[in-house]
Image: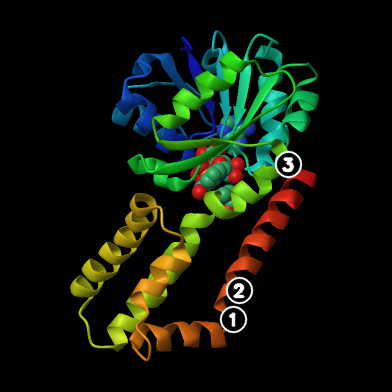
Amino acid sequence: MFKKIAFVGAGSMAEALIAGIVKSGVLEPNQIYVTNRSNQTRLQELTQLYAIQSTSDTETAISGAEAIFLAMKPKDVVGALAEIKPFVSKDKVIISILAGTETKFIADQLGMDLSVIRAMPNTSATIGYGATGLTKGAFVTEEQIQLARTLFETVGTVTIVDEEQMHTVTAVAGSGPAYFYYIVEAMEEAAKKGGLNQVDAKELIYQTILGAAEMLKQTDDEPALLRKKITSPGGTTERGIKTLEEHSVKEAIEAAVYQASNRSKELGEN
Ligand SMILES: NC(=O)C1=CN([C@@H]2O[C@H](COP(=O)(O)OP(=O)(O)OC[C@H]3O[C@@H](n4cnc5c(N)ncnc54)[C@H](O)[C@@H]3O)[C@@H](O)[C@H]2O)C=CC1
Ligand SMILES: O=C(O)[C@@H]1CCC=N1
């Protein structure tokens, strides 16, 4: 395993990954460094929570680190790469979790033929249920991608894909949890209008979504078959699904994924 890793950017995704890695014991907390552009309080908070090392000095954070995680927003990446460039060398691996941003762009900005791994985790990593897509840039070794896999597996599953597939991975898995939350928001609203109190509604809806996910995983049945088993002819589900179809919900979801993927491409181009 890496002896030292550094996070550049101390936001919510960085924290989810740090929490998982620390909890797994794959690395000791003192092997993990984090730095941020401005917010000292945030760095102190992460140090207190996870006993990791934090510093506002870029050089201290990344010198000696074999893996450097880029965890800032895509709009901040050019500035961040300029800041870390003096302390980066070809023997390090850069692991970027930025939406859209290509491995080649990162290597070009750093001006060297170095290994760049691109990852797309999601916020469910916070509780160890993340789904991460990983892809490797031109110079990444098999050992480096396997080490990255081990790190991301501390927060959930890892799927290795070709780089051109990362936009779709981002659209279905990176953004994906938000679509389900959106549906849950609508169900909670409807449950309230239907007369359920909030506590009961939450209990019923959360267990329903969890149960549906586990059915998909554990039975290996296709979703269409699982749906068929619920849909009694002339029954309630049939009426519900018909209403979804009248509102073109399937097309809307496909369009959402397509547009999120397009946005990922735009973020890369900008
Ligand atoms: N939030 C999510 O669901 C997911 C986000 N991502 C990606 O993760 C990245 C971070 O997202 P969040 O954690 O949500 O953002 P965030 O806004 O919570 O955190 C970004 C952090 O980077 C810091 N930063 C900005 N420029 C910096 C610099 N030059 N040097 C050091 N630190 C710098 C900011 O101060 C901030 O603390 C984004 O690129 C996003 O595309 C990927 C998967 C899922
Ligand atoms: O919305 C975004 O751009 C980021 C990437 C995937 C999830 N959040």
Answer above or below: position of 221 versus 240.
above
Answer above or below: position of 103 versus 175.
above
Instruction: Choose the circle earlier in sequence order: 3 or 2.
Output: 3
Q: Which residue is mark 3?
A: 164
Answer above or below: position of 87 versus 181.
above
* Residue 23: percent from left, percent from top: 30, 27
Instruction: Choose the circle earlier in sequence order: 3 or 1.
Output: 3
User: Around disc 1, counting alpha carbons within 10 Å, would you say few (fewer than 14), some (14 to 19), or many (20 or more)?
Assistant: few
Q: Is residue 187 visible in the rendered structure shown here? A: yes
Distance between mark 3 and mark 1 Cα atoms: 29 Å
Q: Which mark is residue 65?
A: none
Q: Amino acid at mark 3?
A: Glu
Distance between mark 1 and mark 2 Cα atoms: 6 Å
* Residue 81: percent from left, percent from top: 70, 27
Residue under the image location 45 percent in, 82 percent down: 241
Q: Which residue is mark 1?
A: 248
Dot 1: element: loop
Q: Which residue is mark 2?
A: 252
Residue 127, picture quadrant: top left
Q: Amino acid at mark 1?
A: Ser
Residue under the image location 28 percent in, 83 percent down: 192
Q: Cβ of disc 2 within 8 Å of ligand 2?
A: no
Residue 48, picture quadrant: top left
Dot 1 and dot 2 residues touching (CB under 8 Å): yes
Dot 2: element: helix
User: Around disc 2, counting alpha carbons within 10 Å, would you say few (fewer than 14), some (14 to 19), or many (20 or more)?
Assistant: few
* Residue 229: percent from left, percent from top: 35, 72
Q: Nearer the viewer, residue 178 or 76?
A: 178
